[in-house]
Structure formats: structure tokens, C-alpha cells
Amino acid sequence: MTDATPAENRPNVECDTGTAAQVQRGAGLYVRVARQHPTVIDAELSCEPGELLAIVGPSGSGKTTLLRVIAGLARPRTGVVHCGGQTWTDLDRGVHRSPQQRRIGLVFQHYALFPHLSALDNVACALGHVPRRERAARARRLLALVHLEGLEPRMPSQLSGGQCQRVALARALAREPSVLLLDEPFSAVDQVTRRKLHQELVLLRRRINTPMVLVTHDLDEARALADRLCVLHHGTTLQTGPPMQVMTRPDSALVARLIDIGNVFEGVVEGHDRHAAVTWLRWQGYLLEARPAVGFAPGTTVSWVVPSSHVVLHRVGRPSRGHRENPVHGIAAEVATLGDYTTVIMHVDGDERTALRFSVPTHVAERNRVVPGTAISVSLLADGIHLLPYEAERSDDTVASTDRRVQKTETRDGVDAASARGLPRQRT
Amino acid sequence: MEWSALELSLLLSGLTCLVLIPASIPLARWLAFTRFRARSFVEALVALPLVLPPTVLGYYLLIGFGADTLLARVYQSLVGRGLVFTFDGLLLASLLFNVPFAVQPIQRAFETVGRDLRHAAYVSGMSAWMTFWRIELPLAWPGLISALALTFAHTLGEFGVVLMVGGNIAGETRTIAIAIYDRVQAFDQHAAGVMSAALLGLSFVAIAVVYMLAPRPQSDRD
């Protein structure tokens, strides 16, 4: 009955940014919401058909609430949600469709399967839009799609975590959703199953052309699966962009800390060399060559980041080309070997207040005899040095949440899992 | 064995369950799913008959059912009968003092149906009404069985309120519990013994049925 509303609402979208307006008209998802209570949200995001957008942020950043708003399960004070060419929410116009009136596939963190119904009936439940006699066959096909042939009569209590997850996914797909929402769908399964489900999600994306929004606190997962990352903090979307861009060029020091770039420092812009396309940065007595950032006038105090992927360890006694690029010297203060990778915390010039973190393959660390207390040198690749508006160190809340994340990972998967992702153990 | 007393007790218990259980479902669901300021107040009101001495409850009901009260006059004009010392009054009293026995188990059962499950049903396209019938009610079923058995058994055994409101009129308000008391007063140990054994058996069967029908809780998977 409300299907008629989008046509009238469309003129309204012109006031938004160009890309947003395009998404609103198209089959994708566009969300802009604000509310104060019970959780503050001030968020804007969009997701094209076939695209996977990952919303990342620490626990309590409002990720799940945002999904609930998209699904119509929570009502913001003001905001719009457009999807599949329809207006689902436009509170200025009093439009707020019920969850039943939106075509949503939502996979819950703990699956939320109906415990008294078989796998088949769980999926068939979401096929209300299909003629009754076709439902069972359709549900079987969906279960086959998620590789659960033969398990149709099983009750949820007779299924493993990964199998429950697949039933939940099949149920979400049964709605033929205009958007697929995944609320930390892999957090409650073991590491092996998670990797398998990751692969299946990648394959599934080739088969359905639906916008997908994945909420996760696992940065590696987000980086591996998403086309774009959206960093959420206290209900506010801080930055959205392709994973590589967000991970190497965060918009702010806060984003850098949230996405676990530990290397956030403070420096002063020395000057710009427009011909060589470099910006010179004064830091701890070093003059560093950085990616051009002409927006900052010489003499400006800035925050700057360098992802650990752009910190290169110098080989002992074998100088190489990289040595010319921003060489920095110090003492290896902490060396933690976690499986294939070794994480090193280097105190620059022996100053423990300036800790530079990076990872190297374990065999490299061993060959170069990197042990606590040894003098080491690294190069900070200029391409990885990214300047940001100055922001005083606010280690308290953000670092605490990062720590929680790491801790959670370790308790869930054991130390091996943490090591596989190269997570720094010292920080927990 | 006073068969008329047993019959009356069974009739009273049956009718109480028939009226009270369906009426308790919406109240219990509301208390389970809705957060509002006065919730504790409503819950306390529901639980009150549990802690109140039956004579106190019976006393207030007796006053409330009195011939010159509004309730009694309305009832009189509608049905043509009074509420004091009649089966009708007894039934009404029974409905009131059984509220906690009916509402609380159902409320607890609805509370086990998590918010995510209801939301999963909504996003699957199921209406609130369909969610109630296909998801909530089947999952709350053990609570309903509990409520049924508790209400039935409790009505069979209630003494104080029945005596206060209904008195001891054979065939009208003399339930089996009253009859037992009556027989003991008359030094008829044999009749009292037989009826007590019957009541014991009935109550035991009612409770045992609950435990048979209630599914064992499945181990929670996270």
C-alpha cells in the first residue's frame, strides 16, 4: 500500500550530494540517520547493488543499532533510508515502513533461528510472498545454495554453529531482499568455519546482485571481504572508502587508532617540494619524506601515521635501496613471535615514549637476530606516511576498545588464531 | 466420599482455567515484552494473591461482592443472581486468587522468547499476529501447560477464600477442600481420609502432567 510513496518523495533527494542522490534513485541502499536516544547515531552511508560495505568500529560504536534502523526495527529521530528505489524511512515526511514492508535479509549475530522449527521450516517461514505449494521446494533450493542438502529436517539444536549460520543466511536470502544485512555473522563460529564461510560469501556475491552491509569488529575480516569500509565511532560515521584507502590514508588520528594503525605520531611540516611531489616532515630530529600534503602550511603541527605495512626492517650488514628512504634507528623493545609473523615494537632512538610498531615474517626476524635490546634500523616508506590534522593523543577510550577487541579474539580462537592475523600480543 | 463436592471442585477448577488462561496470555506477554515505568507495580499487583493470607483476600472479596455494591448490583441485573455464597461469586474469587499462578509461568515463558527471534520473524515478513501464533506461542507452550496445571491444582485445594466468599452450601459452594474440613469437624475420619487421598492424587497427577508435557530445556548454544 505504501508502494506509491517513493515516486512522490523523489524530488526531495535533490538536496543531497550528487552520489547520494544517484544511489537513492537506483537500486542501492542509502541511509542517513540521526538520533540521540538511547544510542547516539549520526550516520550516513550508501551501498550499491553487488557491493559489500563493511561497517567497522569498536564494541558499542552503534553498528548494530544502525543495522536495526535500516531494518526498521529501530526508529531514529530524523533520517532517511532508501533502498531498491523505495523510501523505507523518511521521518520528515512521516514515512517509516515496518520491517515486514521492507525486503530485508538480516543475518543475526547469534543466528536467531526458530528453535522449534526444522531448518527447512526456518527458511520456509520467510517465503510468505511465495505461493504455499512452492515454498518447500524453494526452501530446499535455498538450503542447497548454502550447501545444506540433506539437513532439511534437522532442528537448530542438531546443527553446528556454522550450519546454523548457513540456515540463517538461507532464510535471509529467502526474502529476495533488496539489501542483505549481516550483523557480525562470523563472530560466533570457530576460525576454520569462519574462513570457509568467508569464501562462501565471496562466491555468493557473484550470484546475487544485492547491496550487502556487513557489521564487524574484525578489521581483517572487513579488509578481506569488503569493497568499502565505513568506520563508525560513537554512532558517527567517520570515514568511508575502499579498505586500502582507509587503512593507509585515514581521515583523522581517531580513525587511525580505530582501525588499529598503532603508529600515530606528532610532527611539524617542514615544507613542500612540488617538483619532487614530496612533503618534508620534521619528527624526533628526523626529516622525513612524506606523501605530498600541500594543504598543511610549513610550520604546522600535524598528526601523522605510518601503517606497519610501510615500515621496512633493514637487513643486518646488507644495505639496500630502501635504506635511503626515511631511515629511522632505535632499539627493539618488544619482540613477539606469533606463528608466521613477528611483531616488533621499536623505541625510536631508545625513547620509550616513541614506540613504532611493525610486523615482519618470523624468518626475517630470526635471520636478522631481532631480539629485545638490539639496535635496529627501519625505513618508513614515504608513500605510507600520511599527514592528518593535529589531534592530541587520546589513548584512553579508543585504545581501550582496541585492546578489548584483541582480547576477545584471543579468548575466542586461542593464541594461534591471533597469531595468524599478526595481532600484537603485547597490547592485550 | 462426597461426589457432589468433588464435582463442584472439578467444575470450578475447569472453568477457572478456561477463563483465566486465555485472559492471562495477553497480560503475561505484555509484562514480558514491554518496558514501562509502572511495570513493577503491575507485577506486584499480579503477585499479591501469593503473599496475602486467603482470609484477607476472602474478606475483601466478601465486602466487594456484598449485595449493595455496584459490582453485585450490575451482576444481579445481568445474571439475576448474587455473588455472595453462590457458585458465580466463587468462580469470580477463584479467577482473582489464581492470577499469579496463571500469569507468572506464562510471563516467564514469553521472556525466554528473545527479542532477536521476534525481530527475525518480522524481517522474514511475518506479521506480529503470525509471529505470535507461529513463534511466540509454540515457544511459550511449556509455560502455558505449567499455568494450566498450577491453576487447576491450586483451585482444587483452595480453602480460605472459598470459605469466606462461598460459605459451605452443599451443591453450590461446598468444594472438596471444604467438605474435608466439614467431615473432620464432624469426626468423620473415614470420609475425610478418602477425600484427602482423592485430592492428593488429583494434585499429584496435575503436577506430574506438567513435568511430562514440559520439554526439557535444551542446552544453550552460543
Image (cartoon, rainbow, N blue to C red):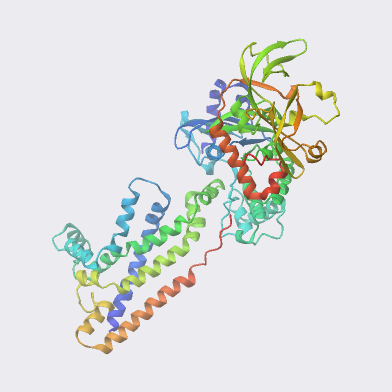
Q: Is residue A98 above or below residue A307?
A: below
- Give how far across and how far down residue A419 sits, in percent: 71, 44
* Residue A360 locus on image (x, y percent): 76, 36
Query: Quadrant of the rendered structure where residue B78 is?
Result: bottom left
Q: How far across and how far down the image is residue B72, in percent? A: 18, 61
Q: Quick one: B21 or A428, which is closer to the camera? A: A428
Residue found 67% across the figure and 32% down from its top: A228
> x, y (%) of residue B26?
39, 55
Q: Tell me if residue B14 can be seen.
A: yes
Farthest residue toward the front?
A373
Query: Is residue A57 rendered to the left or right of residue B8?
Result: right
- Compared to residue B129, the image places residue A1 above or below, namely above
Judging depth in this view, the residue of A426 and B75 nearest the camera is A426
**Left or right: B31 as drawn, with respect to A163:** left
Work out whether A364 lies above or below A299: below
A291 left or right, relative to A133: right
Residue at 41%, 77% (x, y): give it. Answer: B205
The residue drawn where x is 34% and y is 83% is B197
